[in-house]
Amino acid sequence: MTHSIDFDSIEARLFTLHHVTLGSQEFCKRFRIVRDAEHPVEYEWWQYFGHLKALVSGTMIDAAIKIRMLQDIGRAEDSQFDARTLQMEASSGLDIGAIEGHGALSLRDSCNKIVHATGAKLVWQAVERGEDSFEYWTGVYRLFGNDQAGRGWVARINVADWCTAMIRFNSSFQNRIDWADVLKWDE
Protein backbone atom coordinates (compact mmCIF):
# COMPACT_ATOMS: atom_id res chain seq x y z
CA MET A 1 0.00 0.00 0.00
CA THR A 2 1.20 3.46 -0.79
CA HIS A 3 0.07 7.05 -0.88
CA SER A 4 -2.61 7.86 -3.41
CA ILE A 5 -1.12 10.22 -5.98
CA ASP A 6 -3.33 12.16 -8.36
CA PHE A 7 -1.56 11.67 -11.69
CA ASP A 8 -4.00 13.90 -13.55
CA SER A 9 -3.34 16.89 -11.30
CA ILE A 10 0.43 16.48 -11.80
CA GLU A 11 -0.03 16.56 -15.56
CA ALA A 12 -2.53 19.44 -15.44
CA ARG A 13 -0.18 21.60 -13.36
CA LEU A 14 2.79 20.71 -15.57
CA PHE A 15 0.69 21.57 -18.64
CA THR A 16 -0.12 24.99 -17.17
CA LEU A 17 3.53 25.65 -16.31
CA HIS A 18 4.61 24.46 -19.77
CA HIS A 19 2.11 26.81 -21.40
CA VAL A 20 3.17 29.79 -19.25
CA THR A 21 6.83 29.08 -19.98
CA LEU A 22 6.31 29.04 -23.73
CA GLY A 23 3.99 32.07 -23.63
CA SER A 24 5.99 34.42 -21.42
CA GLN A 25 7.60 36.39 -24.24
CA GLU A 26 4.34 37.06 -26.08
CA PHE A 27 2.48 37.92 -22.86
CA CYS A 28 5.20 40.36 -21.75
CA LYS A 29 5.40 41.90 -25.21
CA ARG A 30 1.64 42.41 -25.38
CA PHE A 31 1.40 44.01 -21.92
CA ARG A 32 4.83 45.73 -22.10
CA ILE A 33 6.07 44.18 -18.88
CA VAL A 34 9.13 46.16 -17.80
CA ARG A 35 10.62 46.79 -14.36
CA ASP A 36 10.70 50.57 -14.56
CA ALA A 37 7.60 51.38 -16.59
CA GLU A 38 7.19 55.11 -17.12
CA HIS A 39 3.67 54.82 -18.49
CA PRO A 40 0.52 53.18 -17.10
CA VAL A 41 0.50 49.44 -17.74
CA GLU A 42 -2.05 46.66 -17.37
CA TYR A 43 0.36 44.52 -15.35
CA GLU A 44 3.26 45.95 -13.45
CA TRP A 45 6.50 43.97 -13.56
CA TRP A 46 6.44 43.13 -9.86
CA GLN A 47 2.87 41.77 -10.15
CA TYR A 48 3.80 39.58 -13.10
CA PHE A 49 7.00 38.47 -11.38
CA GLY A 50 5.20 37.60 -8.15
CA HIS A 51 2.50 35.53 -9.83
CA LEU A 52 5.01 33.87 -12.15
CA LYS A 53 7.54 32.91 -9.49
CA ALA A 54 4.80 31.51 -7.22
CA LEU A 55 3.46 29.41 -10.11
CA VAL A 56 6.89 28.21 -11.21
CA SER A 57 8.15 27.44 -7.71
CA GLY A 58 4.98 25.79 -6.44
CA THR A 59 4.44 23.64 -9.52
CA MET A 60 8.06 22.53 -9.77
CA ILE A 61 8.34 21.67 -6.08
CA ASP A 62 5.03 19.76 -6.09
CA ALA A 63 5.84 17.83 -9.28
CA ALA A 64 9.45 17.11 -8.23
CA ILE A 65 8.38 15.63 -4.90
CA LYS A 66 5.62 13.51 -6.44
CA ILE A 67 7.74 12.22 -9.32
CA ARG A 68 10.53 11.31 -6.88
CA MET A 69 7.93 9.45 -4.81
CA LEU A 70 6.73 7.62 -7.92
CA GLN A 71 10.27 6.47 -8.67
CA ASP A 72 10.58 5.03 -5.16
CA ILE A 73 7.09 3.47 -5.32
CA GLY A 74 7.97 1.86 -8.65
CA ARG A 75 11.05 0.21 -7.16
CA ALA A 76 9.06 -0.97 -4.12
CA GLU A 77 6.19 -2.43 -6.16
CA ASP A 78 8.06 -4.00 -9.07
CA SER A 79 11.50 -5.56 -8.81
CA GLN A 80 11.89 -5.15 -12.59
CA PHE A 81 11.12 -1.42 -12.48
CA ASP A 82 14.00 0.53 -13.98
CA ALA A 83 13.63 4.21 -13.11
CA ARG A 84 16.91 5.14 -14.78
CA THR A 85 15.83 3.82 -18.19
CA LEU A 86 12.41 5.41 -17.82
CA GLN A 87 14.06 8.77 -17.00
CA MET A 88 16.41 8.50 -19.98
CA GLU A 89 13.50 7.73 -22.31
CA ALA A 90 11.47 10.61 -20.87
CA SER A 91 14.28 13.12 -21.36
CA SER A 92 15.46 11.88 -24.76
CA GLY A 93 16.15 14.79 -27.12
CA LEU A 94 15.59 17.37 -24.37
CA ASP A 95 17.87 19.74 -22.46
CA ILE A 96 16.47 19.52 -18.93
CA GLY A 97 19.32 21.54 -17.51
CA ALA A 98 22.75 21.31 -15.96
CA ILE A 99 24.75 21.86 -12.84
CA GLU A 100 27.07 24.71 -13.77
CA GLY A 101 30.58 23.36 -14.24
CA HIS A 102 29.49 19.72 -13.88
CA GLY A 103 27.28 18.79 -16.81
CA ALA A 104 23.74 17.74 -17.62
CA LEU A 105 21.07 16.92 -15.04
CA SER A 106 19.07 13.72 -15.07
CA LEU A 107 15.38 13.97 -14.31
CA ARG A 108 15.93 12.60 -10.78
CA ASP A 109 18.87 14.97 -10.18
CA SER A 110 16.78 17.92 -11.34
CA CYS A 111 14.04 16.93 -8.88
CA ASN A 112 16.62 16.69 -6.09
CA LYS A 113 17.99 20.13 -6.91
CA ILE A 114 14.49 21.64 -6.95
CA VAL A 115 13.65 20.13 -3.56
CA HIS A 116 16.97 21.01 -1.91
CA ALA A 117 17.57 24.47 -3.41
CA THR A 118 17.97 27.28 -0.91
CA GLY A 119 17.67 29.94 -3.60
CA ALA A 120 15.88 30.26 -6.95
CA LYS A 121 15.83 32.92 -9.66
CA LEU A 122 13.91 33.34 -12.87
CA VAL A 123 16.18 34.38 -15.77
CA TRP A 124 14.93 37.47 -17.66
CA GLN A 125 15.66 38.91 -21.10
CA ALA A 126 15.17 42.58 -21.95
CA VAL A 127 13.96 43.61 -25.41
CA GLU A 128 14.70 47.26 -26.17
CA ARG A 129 12.12 48.85 -28.49
CA GLY A 130 11.78 52.40 -27.25
CA GLU A 131 8.23 52.91 -25.94
CA ASP A 132 7.47 49.25 -26.63
CA SER A 133 10.37 47.79 -24.60
CA PHE A 134 9.62 44.80 -22.41
CA GLU A 135 11.22 42.03 -20.36
CA TYR A 136 10.22 38.40 -20.40
CA TRP A 137 11.08 35.23 -18.56
CA THR A 138 13.34 33.08 -20.75
CA GLY A 139 12.04 29.81 -19.31
CA VAL A 140 15.25 29.23 -17.38
CA TYR A 141 15.12 28.72 -13.62
CA ARG A 142 18.42 29.00 -11.74
CA LEU A 143 18.67 27.14 -8.46
CA PHE A 144 21.28 27.58 -5.75
CA GLY A 145 22.21 25.37 -2.84
CA ASN A 146 24.86 23.40 -1.00
CA ASP A 147 25.65 19.71 -1.11
CA GLN A 148 26.01 17.61 2.03
CA ALA A 149 29.69 18.59 2.30
CA GLY A 150 28.75 22.28 2.25
CA ARG A 151 30.00 22.94 -1.30
CA GLY A 152 27.86 25.37 -3.26
CA TRP A 153 26.18 24.43 -6.50
CA VAL A 154 24.21 26.29 -9.16
CA ALA A 155 21.76 24.46 -11.41
CA ARG A 156 20.01 25.69 -14.53
CA ILE A 157 16.63 24.16 -15.37
CA ASN A 158 15.10 24.65 -18.82
CA VAL A 159 11.52 24.58 -17.62
CA ALA A 160 9.80 23.79 -20.95
CA ASP A 161 11.98 20.72 -21.56
CA TRP A 162 11.73 19.76 -17.89
CA CYS A 163 7.92 19.84 -18.10
CA THR A 164 7.98 17.70 -21.24
CA ALA A 165 10.23 15.12 -19.57
CA MET A 166 8.15 15.09 -16.40
CA ILE A 167 4.91 14.56 -18.35
CA ARG A 168 6.54 11.78 -20.39
CA PHE A 169 7.83 10.11 -17.22
CA ASN A 170 4.45 10.37 -15.49
CA SER A 171 2.66 8.87 -18.49
CA SER A 172 5.15 6.01 -18.92
CA PHE A 173 5.09 5.28 -15.21
CA GLN A 174 1.31 4.99 -15.16
CA ASN A 175 1.49 2.45 -17.99
CA ARG A 176 4.09 0.30 -16.21
CA ILE A 177 2.58 -0.07 -12.74
CA ASP A 178 -0.57 -2.09 -12.05
CA TRP A 179 -2.31 0.37 -9.72
CA ALA A 180 -5.30 -1.91 -9.16
CA ASP A 181 -2.90 -4.46 -7.67
CA VAL A 182 -0.93 -1.87 -5.69
CA LEU A 183 -4.03 -0.37 -4.07
CA LYS A 184 -6.26 -3.47 -3.78
CA TRP A 185 -5.39 -4.13 -0.12
CA ASP A 186 -5.64 -0.49 0.83
CA GLU A 187 -8.34 -0.33 3.48
Image (spheres, rainbow, N blue to C red):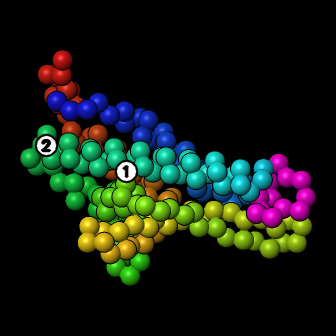
> Mark 2 or mark 1, which is nearer the start of the sequence?
1
- Residue 167 colored magenta? no
User: Residue 82 appears in which quarter of the rendering?
Assistant: bottom left
The type of residue carrying mark 1 is Ala
The type of residue carrying mark 2 is Ala
Q: Looking at the image, which residue sits at the far top?
A: 187
Magenta span of residues: 29-42
Name which residue lies at 26% across and 44% down: 70
Q: CA distance from mark 1 to mark 2?
A: 19 Å
User: Residue 94 appears in which quarter of the rendering?
Assistant: bottom left
User: Residue 130 appears in which quarter of the rendering?
Assistant: bottom right
**Front residue (pair 6, 50):** 50
Task: Report the residue marked by disc 2.
Answer: 76
Checking the image for residue 30, the label placed there is none
Q: Main secondary structure of the magenta part?
A: loop
Task: Report the residue marked by disc 1.
Answer: 64
